[in-house]
Image (cartoon, rainbow, N blue to C red):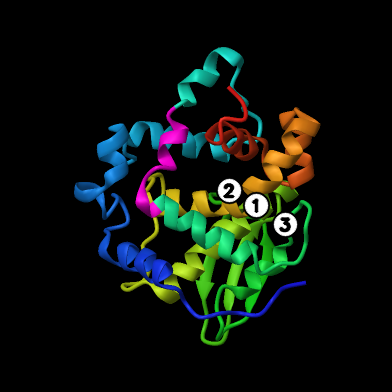
Amino acid sequence: MIAGARKVPEWESELWSYVSMGDGETCPLYSQCEGRQQCHWCPSDNKKEVEKINRFIDDDEFMPSSRESSKFDFIKDVRIGRIFTLVRKLAKMYFDKTVIHCPPVIIDLVSLADDNRPIEVHLLPLKAYHGAIWRMKDAWVIQLNKNDTLARQRFTLFHEFFHILAHCRATPVFRKRGIGGGSFNEALADHFATVILTPEEWLRKKWPEVKDVNRMAEIFEVPRPVIWLRLKALELIQ
């Protein structure tokens, strides 16, 4: 079940103003980000590492070994940036609209992306992408790759959820990456999908009980790399 909608808070308006300011490829707060100044790490300065995250998230089979794990230690620094903090607040706001108290997160939340248009979801045998969105006259259409696992489809669905939110609230229309390229906006959408599907409170409660990445991925119904990166970012695993 889902609770009713509410007015847009100031911090959310702040988020969409930043998205509107940006070019989609680099962080619009680059020159004034306190997080960047504090920890000297920024996605815009470390595009290779961001691309490594993107490739890792997209690969359902790959899991880093204990030796490789340290190469992702920088993931916790991503959380410091203001715009990522706002994206997490956005994810929590929508997560709080559900009255479900245990994983997995229900996909009905996606219906809240646009107050004026319904959201239709179609499974298609996509070749180049996990998913795509189309804004029609009277509805949004989210296309998901029917060949993907259910966990991957769920992650893609919430990734596209963020794109729809940005299309509705940011000006100009939210920019997306081209074939073969990455972008800052794609990183925001991935971050939103990760956070909303793996709520921190649930992770901190479940991880001491489970202590197994594969089992956690099954419980939360997300791809293994997604749950691993989230646990790593929260420093629940080394």
Q: Residue at coordinates 47% horizontally, 76% vertically from top-left?
A: 8
Q: Which of the marked residues, 3 or 2, is nearer the chain's N terminus?
A: 3
Q: Which of the marked residues, 3 or 1, is nearer the chain's N terminus?
A: 3
Q: Report the Cα–Cα distance between label 1 and label 2.
A: 5 Å
Residue marked by disc 1 = 197
Q: Are marks 3 and 2 in contact (CB under 8 Å)?
A: no
Task: Name the amino acid, label 1.
Answer: Leu
Q: Report the Cα–Cα distance between label 3 and label 2.
A: 11 Å
Q: Are marks 3 and 1 in contact (CB under 8 Å)?
A: yes
Q: Residues within 10 Å of mark 2 (few under 14, many from 20)?
A: many
Q: Main secondary structure of the magenta part?
A: helix
Residue marked by disc 2 = 194
Q: Are marks 1 and 2 in contact (CB under 8 Å)?
A: yes
The x, y position of residue 235, in whole percent, is 56, 30
On residue 105, the disc is 3
The x, y position of residue 181, in whole percent, is 38, 45
Q: Report the Cα–Cα distance between label 3 and label 1.
A: 6 Å
Decide: is 21 above or below 84.
Answer: below
